[in-house]
Image (tube, grey):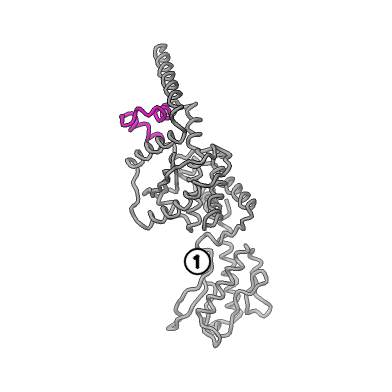
Amino acid sequence: MRVSRWLTFVVAAIIVAACAANAARETQTDTEKKLGKEGAAEAEKSLKFVKDEGYVKRVEKIGQELAATARTTKVPAAYGNADLADFTYTFRVVDDKEINAFSLPAGYVYVNKGLIDDVDSDDELAGVLAHEIAHVAHHHMMKLLHKQAQLDGTVFLLIAAAVIGKVQGSDMQNIFYGAKLVEIAKLNAYSQEAEDDADNTAIEYVLKTKYNPVGVLTFMEKLAQKEAFDPDPGILRTHPPSAKRADNITAALEAHGVAINRWAVTSGMEASARDTAIGNKKVWEVVIGDRVIFQAADTSGATSAERAGAAAERINHQLEQNPQQWEVRVGNDGSAVYVRQQLVVDVLQADADLVGASREAVAIRAKESIQAALTSSQLKLVY
């Protein structure tokens, strides 16, 4: 027992000495690049990747736009440090249905197919990728590894091996070094402080691109709802509470003066016009998701398509203001629908004849459909 402890002490002393000697020659960036390279090599062996170009090109395009911003934008770090580094970012899509994404030091970012299928827009995907890039750019993994090294001797050896750089290609490294790093990254067991820093930094990055930073919030709200109602939230069990993070993201967006319009970044929450058939007649209707709001007839002044498109545009303009259900009403004449005092649907006799109902009945149906869409949207915020 005493010999074992003495040997452990000697080995640790040798490693510490080697690390100190090498520190003068190697920067943290060099160490991160070694760690990332070995972790990526293990990921290539242990993970299955999606080859579908639709997924791959989408992630690569958005990811590289954000990576370019991260390489040149210094955002103050509440966790880790904000030192800019010349990392080359790579993005891979993992063939896994679980909703998760993770990153390795020096810019290796992995996104599960299940997460991509779950986002409602490129804005939400940009928020996820920006969050993972922020972990890399603020060197979160290095801080986490050093913290865990104080509790776990194997993590200490991992860091030491990377710093010394003399175990490359060995069996110990291939089995333990990269595998341990990927395990830590996939669990993504960062503290609330680290996740808040990544969320806030992600907003800063997204603000400098064409994407809408509200996507950072809506995706987090989606995770919060899964946590609240899913008895087995999977990977979310190892993350800080999403509800608290959503509150912090909301505060950060408000501090930046960003208008929180969830309708702009989520699918199924925007009015649109589409063609349909009533009997043998082709007409256009206004829908929100699959919910029909109004079916428009041709008139002497405008076609069915023109009237449906105009109504959809008016509805969307009002939805951007985040109205409540009670703010949707039928006007005094019983044939027009208003949202926040603004006309959105004007039911003509031709519209009523088209569906074989009264103008009042068509207006009431449109009002109730808009209210139902609002209710569906608001239920997503219950967590």
Is 185 included in the stretch rendered in magenta?
Answer: no
Q: Which residue is found at the position 60% from the left and 68% from the top? A: 317
Please determine whether, in this image, residue 2 is positioned above or below residue 233. above
The spot of residue 186 in percent (x, y) is 43, 41
Report whether 111 appears left or right of 325.
left
Q: Please name the residue that numbered disc 1 is placed on.
A: 289
Q: Nearer the viewer, residue 350 or 109?
A: 109
The spot of residue 99 in percent (x, y) is 44, 49
Residue at the limit of the structure toward the bottom, as seen here: 300
Q: Which residue is found at the position 42% from the left and 55% from the top? A: 61
Q: Nearer the viewer, residue 247 or 107?
A: 107
Number of marks drawn: 1
Q: Nearer the viewer, residue 76 or 132?
A: 76
Q: Which residue is found at the position 44% from the left and 46% from the top? A: 101
Q: Main secondary structure of the magenta part?
A: helix
Q: Which residue is found at the position 53% from the left and 66% from the top? A: 270
Report whether 140 appears left or right of 325.
left
Q: Nearer the viewer, residue 104 or 118?
A: 104
Please determine whether, in this image, residue 255 is positioned above or below residue 309. above
Say which amino acid is labelled 1. Gly
Q: Residues within 10 Å of mark 1 (few under 14, many from 20)?
A: some
Report whether 340 appears left or right of 115.
right
Is 158 included in the stretch rendered in magenta?
Answer: yes
* Quadrant housing residue 331: bottom right
Q: Which residues are magenta?
A: 156-181
Q: Quadrant of the N terminus?
A: top left
Residue at the limit of the structure toward the front, as seen here: 25
